[in-house]
Image: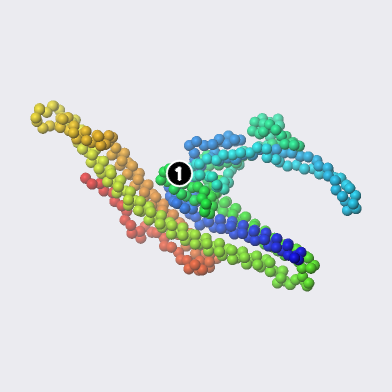
């Protein structure tokens, strides 16, 4: 096999690997752009984007900073340096010696801990299980100590590394309690209560917990995507030119068309990969629009089934309590005892009714029940409003994608069309009226 083949093959494979990494980062960036930010109370099953603060009733205490966190990771590094004498042979075959100075940092201790926590915003809180997530924490501790400092041995091991300079660097990163977070992950039903939780999944497109803002996360994906794209193009072109440097590779000087072939093929593969990535992104966005509409249907069905049952239960409870209040009022109004054999509101006349009511309902709870009904009505309407807002947000973004170039060209491949927005005037489902039976 020709010697010019191996640099070309290795460079092409490295270039393709960089290209794949670039497209993967670009796909993640588009996912962030396509996801509307959900409220904690409006988190539904599926891929969600959430902004809130980290909350916990029993937070962790970090090892170095000793601050309240829901996640922390710490590391202790020790600096070393040494002079190395090495022997080598010069170009005339004579042995020579030279000295070389080496130095570096060696990790001598590390650790960390994470716990489940709640991401809270102005509407509520959602449980987050960080296991398996890519966590982008804050630096909460960074100090360098010498052997005379108390920190040197208090938070570090007693032993030292060979050739130690007796300098240690203490670093710690964490997710502080009450600190703002940006979370992208998959929501699922909790096993203990009827509520969602955000956790790792086998088919999850992304699970990210970051202390950076959404804009900075998106910018980071874009910058690294272009970096890997440029590196892949450079490696492909460099490998081709190395192969051209071999005098046996080509009998005649290469033409300009031959020189442009590898970069051209790289750009063609990138264009095809981008079209596929953009098309799949639009398909996923269209499916999220349809999912958003189904979420409205689910919340409406929940309201239709829940509220009448609550009203019926409270109606019956209120009727029983009314009978108790009537009997008690009759007893309070009795000024004198009723003669034997005469009708009157004495205890013997109402004791049976009271006993039945008390046995069936030991506590008078209608007032609390009405309060819970009010809360259920408010929460239900809020959930429906959040579902409608989610649908309109994702449908608006989908429509914008279909109108923008070059996404509009890709959308024609799948004959994609915008989905109608949900307007309050055109919403035909009338609100549920609550009416108690007397």
**Is residue 421 visible in this depiction of the protein?**
yes
Quarter the C terminus occupies: top left
**Is residue 140 visible in this depiction of the protein?**
no
| Residue toward you, 353 or 213 | 353
Quarter the N terminus occupies: bottom right
Eyeballing the image, is 142 above or below 37?
A: above
**In x, y percent, where is residue 404?**
52, 64
Eyeballing the image, is 419 above or below 437?
A: below
**In the shown orientation, is residue 221 left or right of residue 116?**
right
At 37% across and 57% down in the image, what residue appears? 424
| Residue toward you, 388 or 78 | 78
| Residue toward you, 187 or 227 | 187
At 59% across and 43% down in the image, what residue appears? 138
**In x, y percent, where is residue 293?**
41, 58
Q: Which residue has dot 1 on it?
A: 125
**In the shown orientation, is residue 252 left or right of residue 414?**
right
């Amino acid at each position: 096999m020709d010697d010019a083949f191996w640099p070309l093959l290795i460079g092409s494979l490295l270039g393709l690997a960089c290209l794949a990494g670039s497209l993967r980062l670009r796909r993640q960036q588009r996912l962030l752009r396509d996801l509307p930010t959900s409220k904690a109370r409006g988190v539904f099953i599926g891929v969600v984007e959430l902004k809130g603060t980290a909350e916990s009733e029993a937070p962790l205490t970090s090892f170095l900073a000793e601050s309240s966190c829901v996640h922390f990771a710490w590391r202790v590094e020790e600096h070393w340096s040494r002079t190395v004498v090495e022997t080598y042979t010069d170009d005339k075959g004579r042995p020579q010696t030279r000295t070389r100075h080496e130095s570096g940092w060696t990790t001598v201790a590390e650790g960390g801990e994470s716990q489940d926590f709640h991401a809270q915003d102005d509407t509520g809180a959602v449980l987050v299980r960080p296991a398996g997530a890519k966590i982008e924490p804050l630096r909460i501790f960074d100090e360098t100590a010498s052997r005379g400092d108390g920190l040197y041995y208090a938070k570090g091991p007693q032993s030292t590394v060979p050739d130690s300079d007796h300098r240690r660097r203490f670093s710690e990163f964490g997710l502080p309690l009450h600190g703002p977070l940006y979370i992208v992950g998959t929501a699922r039903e909790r096993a203990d209560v009827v509520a969602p939780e955000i956790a790792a999944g086998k088919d999850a497109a992304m699970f990210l917990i970051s202390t950076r803002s959404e804009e900075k996360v998106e910018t980071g994906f874009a910058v690294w995507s272009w970096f890997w794209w440029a590196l892949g193009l450079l490696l492909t072109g460099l490998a081709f030119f190395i192969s051209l440097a071999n005098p046996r590779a080509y009998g005649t000087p290469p033409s300009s068309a031959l020189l442009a072939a590898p970069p051209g093929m790289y750009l063609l593969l990138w264009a095809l990969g981008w079209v596929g990535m953009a098309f799949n992104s639009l398909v996923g966005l269209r499916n999220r629009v349809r999912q958003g509409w189904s979420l409205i249907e689910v919340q409406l069905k929940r309201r239709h089934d829940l509220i009448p049952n609550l009203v019926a239960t409270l109606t019956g409870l209120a009727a029983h309590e009314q009978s108790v209040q009537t009997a008690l009022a009759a007893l309070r109004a009795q000024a004198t005892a009723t003669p034997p054999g005469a009708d009157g509101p004495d205890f013997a006349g109402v004791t049976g009714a009271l006993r039945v009511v008390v046995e069936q309902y030991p506590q008078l709870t209608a007032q609390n029940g009405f309060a819970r009904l009010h809360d259920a009505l408010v929460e239900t309407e809020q959930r429906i409003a959040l579902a409608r807002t989610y649908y309109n947000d994702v449908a608006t973004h989908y429509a914008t994608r279909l109108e923008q170039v070059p996404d509009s060209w890709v959308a024609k491949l799948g004959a994609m069309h915008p989905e109608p927005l949900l307007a309050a005037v055109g919403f035909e489902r009338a609100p549920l009226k609550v009416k108690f039976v007397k």
